[in-house]
Amino acid sequence: MHVIKKALCMFCHSNCGILAEVENGRVTKVRGNPDNQLSRGRICLRPSAALEFHYHPDRVNYPLKRKGARGEGKWEQISWDQAVDEIAARLKEFKARHGAETVAIGRGTYRTYYWPMVRFQNLFGTPNMYNPGQICFCNTWSTHVATYGTFAAARSAMHNPNSKCVVLWGFNPAESYPLVWQAIKNLKKQGTKIIAVDPRRTAAAEEADMWLQLRPQTDGALLMGFLNVIINEGLYDKEFVEKWTYGFDKLRERVQEYPLNKVADICWVPAEKIREAARMYAVGGHALMPCGVKLDQLGRNQTQAIRAQCVLRAITGNLDVDGGEPFGISGEILRAIDDNEMELHDALPQEQKRKQIGVDRFRLFTWPGYEMLCEPSKGIPYVWPPTVNESCNAHEPSVWRAILTGNPYPVKALLIQGNNALLQATNTKLVYEALKSLDLSVVHDYFLTPTAMLADYVLPAADWLERAVVAPVAGMRNFINAGEKIVDPEYERRDDYQFWRELATRLGQESYWPWKTMEEACDYRFKPMGYTFKEVVEMGGVPGTRELKKYEKHGFATPTRKVELYSTIFEKLGYDPLPNYEEPAESPVSTPELAREYPFVLATGGRIKYFYHSEFRQIGSMRKHHPDPLVQIHPDAAAKLGIGDGDWVYLESRLGRARFKAQLFDGIDPRVVHAEHSWWFPEDPAPEPSLFGVWKSNVNVLLDDDPDHCDQICGGWPHAGLCKVYKA
């Protein structure tokens, strides 16, 4: 029997529409769905690996229970029911003996349903869910909400010919978002100016009219330089600023602290080039500045850099206008039941919220800030409040320390879903020690990963061909997209919703989980829109109505009902209410003695289109295109070290070392190297000490996550530092 079904690809956040052909219960082909109203048949190369991923012989197919020592690689195959029964019994024991807060939950990037995890967390009573959102978009989301009450969704406007300038700031969509990249190239053909801000000459930089090659982690200073030019030269939208912003006079005073000669010295970008780029952005029509995630990875100063970017959009009049950056939600057609409502965060007692790890220090991204962000959205119809998942997480580096030290209290158990912590988190040796120290570790994932090798239980996860998918209903863009389950999960794989629901029912939460499947839950959520889940799938998604300048009717969802250039939320939380720049904790400027021993600025995090962070290393069709971990180094710097193109080299920091293949590249400053992230080797031995080669080329071994080095507002940890390079 031959059927064609409509799926959504979950290999990145674009969630493109897919047509999947099924013959006698087996998926035989996938291709783009031309009827999907968002992607319209366009897909990148990753879905071509969907069948290889789905039918891969190394998939985890049955629940595994550890038999030997952690990391020894000895497993007993058990049934799903036995696994969940035993895990639930252990969780009851921890809650009764130590308190619910001693159970933490870790998730990965957007491969999983978020709201069921948070619903379980809140009903169980733990405030401690962590995720990589603090280094990947979620702190950007929180900062947008603090500044203008919602998210400015530039990526959704990339097709608009009325955009006269696009600034790609730490964003290389040629590798990360191919469909966005095509839209940008189309805009350039129509005369739109492109500015790229990046330490490397990426594909985006090569396409750009201007490339600002800044020192890694100095983005905040460069943004303050832009603001200095635009304010002092009167290039801002005076009418909008006067009517719709709060604190402009104080902002004007602040930017005087950043004259261009000072900014140029900090950033390594000539002053006149900064001036020219700022003018290009501010003059000549509306502009876009889509969010990459590089600002989320600065460590110190990340939130204030994002704040400066928000302020820059606002004072130039680029918010919610034709050719500028629309706010993500508009129109009653999209009034589905939101993730925020599904999470049930009111079920978590206030005394538990106060126990959240990091709540005393990183206040914007924990419960104090979250509640302040939610309050102003009441009564603003074009805004959904942020979700707990997006804007209210335990501080991950502090969770690892709580496991090891018991401060502020011991964390005994960890439930990990779609998160390969040994590759995702920096300071890998500390993370390894923490994972080895747990009383209970549970992993729900597709493959045995280095992190899964240290678990007590590994449960098999269903992929996007085996589950219903909805993306997104969290308010990130003006569109609701849905894909059906293509085939039933094979073996004993379970989707994310089933995992949390089955665990919840064993822990007495039955009445809060009335929907047996994700499809039933989606029917409930879509009912206010007048649609069923199947109808949304058949329609190829539901777009919202597009209305601009919504703030003219309702104001902004902030305490002052204006764009807060001077943030009253930051002020109440005890932070500087104006954007500023702070030097990284480890740099040639802040630690000159360390820089003499480790003379290179180490950057990391650049995307590779064949992988998604640590995923796809075992997928042969992807790996053959990019078989080895690379470090980019300038030819002049390499020559001084006797390093040739293709040589294997060590990168070493004060924390450790890792091995990479040198790629000589004149598009990087001779004082900087860029090492690829998330490398492990599924072909290497699984048991300790190898753990699939996790120690060989893992750049996170070199990087610190000391809470003192993190951003003090949202808690993000740095993805740069200092290193030396020598031949292996």
Image (tube, grey):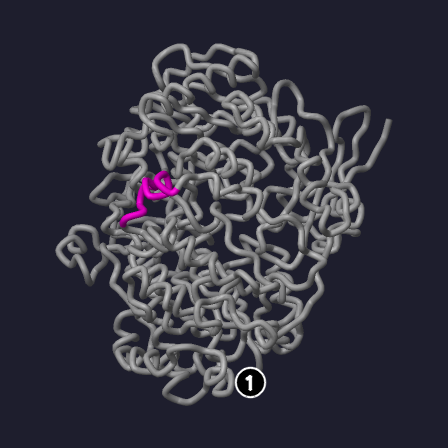
Image-based side of 293 in relation to 180, left or right: left
Image spot of residue 655 (x, y percent): 23, 41
Q: Which residue occupies 29% across, 31% down?
A: 403
Q: Nearer the viewer, residue 614 or 596?
A: 614
Q: Which residues are magenta?
A: 350-360
In the image, farthest residue toward the right = 1
Q: Which residue occupies 32% across, 40% down?
A: 355
Image spot of residue 553 (x, y percent): 61, 75
Q: Is residue 142 magenta?
A: no
Image spot of residue 628 (x, y percent): 45, 39
Q: Is residue 357 magenta?
A: yes
Image-based side of 592 in relation to 266, left or right: left
Bin the neighbour count of mark 1 within 10 Å (Cα to Cα): few under 14, some 14-19, many 20 and up.
few
- Characterize the magenta stretch by its predominant secondary structure: loop
Image-based side of 554 in relation to 435, left or right: right
Q: Which residue is mark 1?
A: 284
Quadrant in which the N terminus appears: top right
